[in-house]
Amino acid sequence: MIKKIQLLSLWMLLGNISLIAQNCNQNIFLNTQAEIDAFSVTYPGCTQFMGSISIVGATPTEITDLSGLNQLTSIQGNLSISDNVSLSSLNGLHNITSIGGDLYLQELAGLSNFNGLNSVTSVGGIMRIRNNPDLLNLLGLENLATVGSIFSIQDNDSLKDINDLSSLTFIGNSFVIFDCPSIVSFSGVNNLVDVGNNFEIGGGMDALASISGFQSLQIIEGDLRIGGIVLQSITGMNSLSSADYFYLENNPILTDISGFSGLASVFGTLTIRNNTVLNDLTPLSNLTSVGIQVIINNNDSLQSLDGLDNIELQSNNSNFIGIYNNPMLSICNQAFFCSHLASGVSRNIFNNASGCNSDSEIIALCDPSLFACHGVDLMINNIFNPIYRAFNSITSGGEVYGNRTFTAGNIISLDNHFTVHPGAEFEAIIQTCDNN
């Protein structure tokens, strides 16, 4: 009899455990204050919730207090809190240390900060902070260390800074922030080391005069995009060594980019465009490698490309140099540009100041030895000839099918395997390259 009672008790215990597990492993919507207050009764023992929880009131004023959720220590799925004007804090979530999926905090008009999430150290998926009109800062996220996917902050009209992200070290996908017109500082975000995809600070940041902070950021594994901001200086990010693509564009009052002094490699394209008063690229002097293209255009005050002297394009069929519509740019004969013009890289150079307004103007100011014997094979009337040196300049980006005479300038500049087809005229004084 005693054994039967023991077995029955064990069966009941296992049944209760199974019931708790089932209750905790589902996706739920909490739409009323009563459902939140009854959470511990409805989901007894659910401290580690295996599913997702969505908190959105039947009306924006329905939910006023999250204290009924205080048994939760982790959520394996997503946590979404949205469309509420009556919550003044997130107290009740204070025991949660991790969220395995996404965390959405959006359209919460009554919140000035995120107090109540102070114990959260990790979000495994997307983190989105969006359209919270009264949000002033990110207090409550000071212990957040990792976000596994995209971290997006947007459309928060009153947000002054994100300095409470002081413990953040890793973002697995992109970091994006835009349309937060009151933000004045990123200065407290100094432990972020790695961003797994794009890093973008975009438009609608009207109060942001300087990008400081991000002092520990070393690697951006996607695009770096800073643009569309009335920004005067970028002084943070000094530890950044590499990015996939680099876009600095549409910043009308930007003058100081000293924060990029540590940048060494851009694996794709380096683009600097539409920065009206930017006139100094020397903070980029440690940049030694660009994978595909260098594009410098529509920078009204830029006078020199000093700072890009040490770049080497990583050779491939997509290499391209574009320097155009920079009305004050007159100094382009840095070693980088001269050597790549000599190698026949594809380029587009026009509408700059005298000295940098065409291939021939730049070449005339380059070291002549770069162009003496640079290994370009020349085909004349389909007859293969040795490598030549020309004393009347021949500059072309393609094949010659019709009659064309090249006479201006001093130095030859030909693309690889430049061809003049039968019947075309090709005039130049040439002599065999003697490799001296």
Image (cartoon, helix red, strand yellow):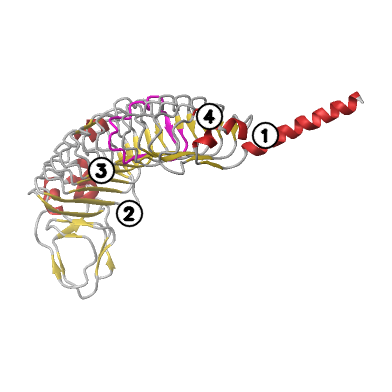
Badge 2 marks a residue whose secondary structure is loop
Label 2: how many residues lie within 10 Å, few (<14), some (14-19) or many (20+)? few
Q: Which numbered marker is on residue 20?
A: 1
Instruction: Reply yes or no: does residue 165 show up in magenta.
Output: yes
**Tally of marks:** 4
Write the start and end of the magenta stretch as one range. Answer: 147-171
Distance, label 3 to label 1, CA atoms, is 48 Å
Which is more N-terminal, label 2 or label 3?
3
Q: Name the amino acid type tagged 1.
A: Ile
Badge 3 marks a residue whose secondary structure is loop
Q: Which numbered marker is on residue 203?
A: 3
- Residue where numbered disc 2 is placed: 318
Distance, label 2 to label 1, CA atoms, is 59 Å
Distance, label 1 to label 4, CA atoms, is 18 Å
Residue at image coords 12%, 43%: 331
Label 4: how many residues lie within 10 Å, few (<14), some (14-19) or many (20+)? some
Which is more N-terminal, label 1 or label 3?
1
In depth, the one of 170 and 151 nearer the eye is 151
- Residue where numbered disc 4 is placed: 68
